[in-house]
Amino acid sequence: MGPAVRAVFRELLRRELEERYRGSLLGAAWLLLLPLLQLAVLAWVFGALLPARAMGGGELPYAAFLALGLWPWNLLANAVNRGVTALTDNAALIGKVTVPHGLYVDTRVAASALIELAGFAIVLLALWLWGVPLDWTGLPALAAGLGVVAVLALALARLLAVLQVFLRDIAALTSQLLVLGFFMTPVLYDRTLLPPAVSPWLVLNPMTVPVEAIRAGLSGGPVDWQALAVCAAVAGLLLVLAQWLMRRGRAHLEDFL
């Protein structure tokens, strides 16, 4: 990435971040308040209104168990949802500015990742202050798991953004598939509680392993590093495929835009 492309990337990223909070009364303060409000709602609903406990989640309160899976999922879902329409939303700009088309997708994914990672950091700090027994020796698992999620989000966003140019139903379909994916990812539940005939199949969901690795690392459980490495390799291959598809379709993208 040359200096000119980096400058365009920074400008697109700045514009994307500003648009997220433009017109709101509190502006960027929502970056701090929203994660805390979400965590407070989770704690109230699953701690007082509907008391629940994370079976297999160690000593973690269910709200903490849920939070450790929810924010990694939010990173993927929000990045993909924003990235899938990045090319069609910037059709006018693509015809005027000569930069790699993937840059428009990358900036939306980067903005979503920055917001969700900042929110996750705030949530982890709040959980620690709340007295939740987080195991900070699990930070390597946290970093590795979030890295896999970020690469997977970028790969899916690039793939779907290209397909969206040629098939405008992709964005709507993506939203519905993400809803399905949420329930197929062990965010609300511990996978060990599922029937033995079902539980192993969830590993085919590429979000299962990183979510479980993050949760296991921070709760003091064993991390399946081998499965996480396989998941990272799959995410890397998807990113290579997405880059190839974007290069292959570059000559035709502007015609369809």
Image (cartoon, helix red, strand yellow):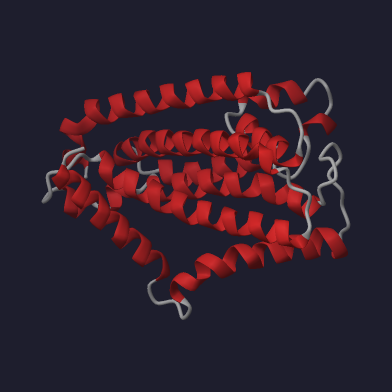
**Residue 60, horizontal then vertical, whole percent:** 81, 47
> Can you say which quadrant of the picture contains the N terminus?
top left
- Image quarter of residue 43: bottom right
41 sits left or right of 169 in the view: right
Give coordinates of residue 55: x percent, y percent.
86, 40
Q: How many numbered discs, if any? A: 0
Which sits in the foreground, 12 or 157? 12
Identified at 55% across, 58% down, the residue is 119
State which quadrant residue 202 falls in. Answer: top right
Would you place residue 108 above or below residue 174 in this image? below
Q: Residue furthest bottom?
A: 25
| Residue in the image at 51% along x and 33% along y | 148
The image quadrant where one finds the C terminus is top left
State whether residue 193 appears in this view: yes
Residue 184 seen in the current view? no
Pick whichever, 250 or 187, lies toward us: 187
* Left or right of 12 on screen, residue 210: right
Residue 236: image x %, image y %? 43, 25
- Indicate the quadrant where residue 130 lies: bottom right
Q: Residue at x 51, y 56 (%)?
A: 118
Query: Is the residue 83 above or below the residue 1 in the image?
Result: below
Q: Position of residue 255 (x, y in %)?
A: 16, 39
Give the residue drawn at x 26%, y 53%: 10
